Image (cartoon, rainbow, N blue to C red):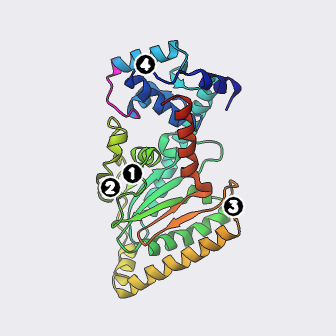
Amino acid sequence: MSHAFRNKMMIVPPDVPNPAGKSVLKALAYFDIFHYPLKKAEIRQFLDRPISDSRLEIILKELVTDGLIFQNYDMYSLQDSPLLACKRVEGNLRAASLLPKAQKIGKFLFRFPFVRGIGVSGSLSKNYADEKADIDFFIITKANRLWIARTLMHLFKKITFLGGREHFYCMNYFVDEEALLLSDQNIFTAIELKTLLPVSGNPAVQEFFLANLWANEWFPECAFRQQSEKPPRYVGLKYFFEWCCNNSFGNRLDSFLQKLTDKRWKRKQARGKRNNKGLMMGLVTDKHFAKSNPGAFQEKVLTMYKERMDSLGL
């Protein structure tokens, strides 16, 4: 955090003029964690209350005049830094070139047995990619077959290491059809839900969105995103494999793979193993979900968000 930003934060009065102004500051405070300025349309999406375009325009001008926020080009931020705006433009351009690849890979991953839905998540789903960007995927599987699907997909990922392409296949979050409602219901997961980009398996993804309508309470003006690409063709091998495991053997195999994976990850965590970004590796597991949480990332983001909210007097 820059020296100028710290000084600005310390002189912000504890009570912002009106609720609409507070809503704008809350949205900018969250994305400030990632040093990511927002355009007016994006601010409107991530407000916690409906505000008309004309009213939002007035509020933004007032906040800029009062020195509570800063405008650089067509972007707004809590930091007065044109470099952040330039960095964002560069990241948006990289994301635009990477998204077609993400769509192609997502369609390929959809062909694995028991996979019912694929979405792009992480920074790329927010139209941003840095120089070392990963492609993160959110995956929905058939009920009680998550661990078979995940194991097969991660066995394939090991092959991608040979070509140094593993960062294009970051399968970070799995849920099955029995666990569509997310237990973590906070601003972090609400934004991840609202920015999730469906790639394949639209029926399953839409059921997932319907199960998590609570996110509308956080962002009533931000719609869930729709699948824009045509779904891939059905693959006979996928459904033949599913037919072979659609029995008690499949039930036992799925449970076995869950226990095996859980033991392996506990050993990794006990050894303090880190990923290629230097973060402590972590995997939260259950029969019906598996989510990567390197370096307790979600918890850190929520802590930083609270600190910014406290500094702003919100």
Pair 4/2: label in front: 4
Q: Secondary structure at mark 4?
A: loop
User: Could you tell me if the residues under marks 4 and 3 are in contact, i.e. CB atoms within 8 Å?
Assistant: no
User: Could you tell me if the residues under marks 4 and 2 are in contact, i.e. CB atoms within 8 Å?
Assistant: no
Which amino acid type corresponds to the residue marked 3 in the rendered image? Arg
- Residue ID for mark 2: 202
Residue 142 lies in quadrant: bottom left
The vertical placement of 230 against 162, above or below, is above
Which amino acid type corresponds to the residue marked 2 in the rendered image? Asn
Which amino acid type corresponds to the residue marked 1 in the rendered image? Pro
Pair 3/1: label in front: 3
- Residue ID for mark 4: 17
Is 157 left, or right, of 280 in this rendering?
Answer: left
Q: CA distance from mark 1 to mark 2?
A: 7 Å
In the rendered image, residue 178 lying in the magenta stretch gets the answer: no
Label the magenta part by its dominant secondary structure.
loop
User: Could you tell me if the residues under marks 1 and 2 are in contact, i.e. CB atoms within 8 Å?
Assistant: yes
- Residue ID for mark 3: 274
Label located before the other in sequence (3 or 1): 1
Quadrant containing the N terminus in the rendered view: top right
| Mark drawn on residue 198 | 1
The vertical placement of 245 against 118, above or below, is below
Residue 80 seen: no
Which amino acid type corresponds to the residue marked 4 in the rendered image? Pro
Callout 4 crowding tier (Cα within 10 Å): few <14, some 14–19, many ≥20: few
Task: Give the magenta part as a residue range.
Answer: 46-54
